[in-house]
Amino acid sequence: MAAANVRDVAALAGVSVGTVSNVLNQSKHVSPATSQRVLAAIDELGFIRNDAARQLRVGQSRTVGFMVLDVSNPFFTDIARGVEDTLTQFNRSLLLGNSGEDAGRELGYLDLFEEQRVSGLLITPVGDVLPRLERLRSRGSPVVLVDRHENADSFSSVSVDDRLGGRLAAEHLLDTGRTSLAFLGGPASILQVADRAGGARDALASRGAAPLRVLEFDAMRAEAGRQGAEQLLALPTEERPDAVFAANDLIALGVLQGLTHAGVRVPDDIAIIGYDDISFVADAAIPISSIRQPAWEMGRAATELLMAEIDDPGARDYRHVVFQPELVVRESTVGGGASQAG
């Protein structure tokens, strides 16, 4: 049996094809009684809307693309949850891409999003893709940057004040009596990493403390933290830092694993603070202090900015929403079972 089409629905409901289309698009121009007849016909015939065909006709889908930096990091999955929860309110669906901090992979996903004619794009950029994003927008798909601030006012953005976050982390370590800090992060080309390290340097300079030791890795994952722990432990004891500021919580977890495996006492010998405040750090063998980012709220705010641009495609009033980070103190920096937000 051939699948029912929109004409079949119209014939059974006794309405025009245009009326069926209005019901499918949730138009307010159809009376409740007529809508009920159309919906009953859809149900009886088992009609399934061919959204791909509709997309070809109107030149755009009801799908929003979201390119995350690293889907293995719970921080980005929490942002994605905020995006998806908000999109449901606008009757939109989510197409998720994971760049994995790889610029080449990022370009491949941008090609895919363009082929799918996404109605809009949320992205945490890795490479220099702003010209590509400009092209995407010129073809009718607005773009909002997520976890990235854009000073040129060419795109709306949602971010956290990472420089302040880096400063909070370093000041906390100094306040607990630490004197030598190491920063473990991904490539400095990632703006968030550079800002967090910059904030830590600001704090050290204002206190007249020793310069920040920086260890840079290709990716911001737990393996980088374990490698960093090995490198720190290979230093002569007198050169070894007494505190580690990890650019994200995955690195912090790896550092904790590496240090405790080597018999180093945390925080007695070396204190550790991470960034993002993902759920895993509170449940670690030694709960890890962190700088909290409001991930779900960032996803919601970014989606609302994007939908505003989709609804008003001619607008060029780009907005930048900046959330404030929050220090969360746990045993990895103070010991004794303490846990508090500050």
Image (cartoon, grey):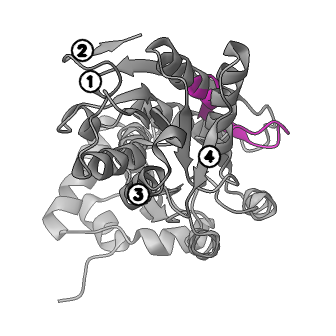
Q: Residue at x 31, y 47 (%)?
A: 259
Mark 3: amino acid: Glu
Q: Residues within 10 Å of mark 1 (few under 14, many from 20)?
A: many
- Residue 310 shows in this picture: no
Could you say where residue 21 lies in the image, as x and y percent from the top left? 44, 58
Q: Give the distance between the C-alpha atoms of the residues marked 4 and 2, in whole angstroms.
A: 28 Å
Q: CA distance from mark 4 to mark 1?
A: 23 Å
Sooner in the amino-acid sequence: mark 2 or mark 3: 3
Which numbered dot is residue 230?
3
Type of amino acid at the residue the image marks with label 2: Ala
Closer to the chain start, of discs 2 and 1, is 1
Q: Are marks 2 and 1 in contact (CB under 8 Å)?
A: yes
Residue 184: image x %, image y %? Answer: 52, 47
**163 within the magenta span:** yes
Q: CA distance from mark 1 to mark 3?
A: 22 Å
Identify residue type, mark 4: Val
Which numbered disc covers residue 331? 1
Amino acid at pointer 1: Glu
Q: Give the answer, above or below, for where 53 lies relative to 28.
A: below
**Of labels 3 and 4, the one closer to you:** 3
Up the image or down, 243 lies above or below 177; here it is below
Q: Position of residue 117 (x, y in %)?
A: 59, 67
Part of the protein shown in magenta: 149-166
Q: Is the C-beta separation of discs 4 and 1 under 8 Å?
A: no
Q: Mark 3 and mark 4: span between their CA atoms? A: 14 Å
| Disc 2 target residue | 338
Q: Earlier in the sequence, mark 4 or mark 1?
A: 4
Q: Quadrant of residue 108?
A: bottom right
